[in-house]
Image: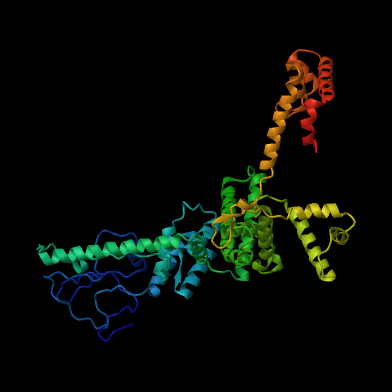
Amino acid sequence: MTTPGGTVAKAKSTTASSTPSADGATEAPTVQASAKGAAAAKGATAKRASKPAAKSTAQKPASTPKAKPSATKGSTKATKSAPSKGDDADATSTVASAGWLATAPIKNVLASGKKAGSVDTAELTVAFNKAVAEIGVEPEEANFEDLMEVVEAQGISIADLAEDEVIDDEEGGFENEDIEDDDEDAEATEKFEREEMEARAEAMADARVKTNDPVRQYLQEIGRVKLLTLEEEISLARRIEEGEAARKRLDEDADSFEERERRRQKRVVEDGDLARQHLIEANLRLVVSIAKKYNGRGMSFLDLIQEGNQGLIRAVEKFEYRRRYKFSTYATWWIRQAINRAIADQSRTIRIPVHMVETINKLTRASRRLQQELSREPTYEEIADAMGPDWNAEKVEEAFKLTREPFSLETPIGDEEDSFYGDFIPDENIESPVEQASKIILSEELEEALDKLSEREAMVLKLRKGLVDGREHTLEEVGSHFGVTRERIRQIENKALRKLKYHESRTRKLRDFLD
């Protein structure tokens, strides 16, 4: 545009040329506000530059005479403004200089970023990987910083990139002044430090309270992942399929590929793994909602979630995206199956095989149905008839025995809980005092009756009848003990029994113990 003074003014950009004034003096050079300068300034900010940022206006020398006022409305000092059409032109030239920056993935992410006003580093990373894979450039050969410069030059903010503030020494710096430490300043400093320490202690306590609940912490982590639409699920499933196909090709024909093609296939495999991870993480909340319905069945809530996650991973592997069903509809069945099998396999103290648990469930349903029909408890024969020809009463009884749950002997009894269930269970191995007294008297009477026999005959009878150690010894064992044959032991035993039989006075007292 031509001004009334005949000077041509550029509306959008300011060049870095020196304009001679009417007095022959030279005006101070202006700063070019290009896309590259804006990107460099932001890059320096992101890297926490230690040097103070340069001022956006150039200072005139003190000895330079003033130039004639320009007829244009803009000032001769160039200020840092929002990206203009000139900036877009510079960015376009940057894209043209690097071939991978001109690919469709890069253009798409820039277009979406302009529309939304911001873009995150995850989207830029995905676009970067796709772009270098599309033209066959190694990621090491391409520079991710070039993409960052183009994004910033076009006025697109990076949402998850926190820029650190850089304080200019002339504006926000502190001068080296000597400050006197009086009593008031010391007390104020001490009070401030004490309050700061208390605040830190409270914050640390709150953090411990939050992290001590693993369920809440897990729910907070999975809640950060955005839910997927149907089209996003299909896109991720397609990438997973492509990654699996590339992995299969590498496993079968890895040697037949050139090095460049092999690297490209590996990138496809890595992209498929990332897609699988994204699809799983976006559906972890579905597992939690299903696991809540199975809480209180012998497994902890976190264990139920973990087993449900296994089913979710299985659903990702089996998902057929071409049917265009929502992934959650398909994955629900796999998650339920995994949780049900885990409960059947792990919830009991004494493990029962999964197939037997299913059989017990069928028996239970048949028993309840018969109870409603007969208005009474069905017998084992009736349940066996309802189950089919392969069942009988004994088989039904054995199956129902497996449903018994273990019972702790330390279960408290009563409201005061001062006694336990195990205190009321009698020990069947302990004899009553009457039985113990009878055995003692019998032993004494036997000893008195055997005293009439020889020592050898008495010992043979004791060993044969189990009066020594409670076990009846065989003829061979007794014979080896005395160093004689078994026939000789039999003769000694018969002789001793005849003596006791014919001497009734010796055995009269023993007959009372036989009644």
The colouring scheme, among rainbow, by chain, secondary structure or one colour, is rainbow
**Residue sitting farthest toward the front:** 505
> Which of the 4 image quarters holds residue 30?
bottom left
Q: Considering the image in quadrants, where does the N terminus appear?
A: bottom left
In the image, 282 versus 166, the foreground residue is 282
Q: Residue 299's spot in the image, x, y percent? A: 61, 57
In this rendering, would 172 be left or right of 276?
Answer: left
Q: Looking at the figure, which quarter contains the C terminus?
A: top right
Residue 327 relative to residue 135: left or right = right
In x, y percent, where is residue 486?
Answer: 82, 17
Residue shown at 33% from the left, 59% from the top = 47
Is residue 429 visible from the viewing direction of this image?
A: no
In front of the other: 37 or 402: 402
Work out which residue is located at the far bottom of the displayed protein and give it.
4
- Residues 231 and 95: in front is 231
Residue 380 point in image, percent of width and height: 84, 58
Question: Which corner quadrant of the image does residue 206 belong to?
Answer: bottom left
Q: Is residue 164 visible?
A: yes
Identity of the residue drawn at 66% across and 42% down:
433
Disc tally is 0
**Looking at the image, residue 71 lies above or below residue 186:** below
Direction from residue 439 to residue 45 in the image, left or right: left
| Residue 505 placement, left or right of 73 | right
Q: Residue furthest top?
A: 483
Q: Position of residue 218 (x, y in %)?
A: 51, 61
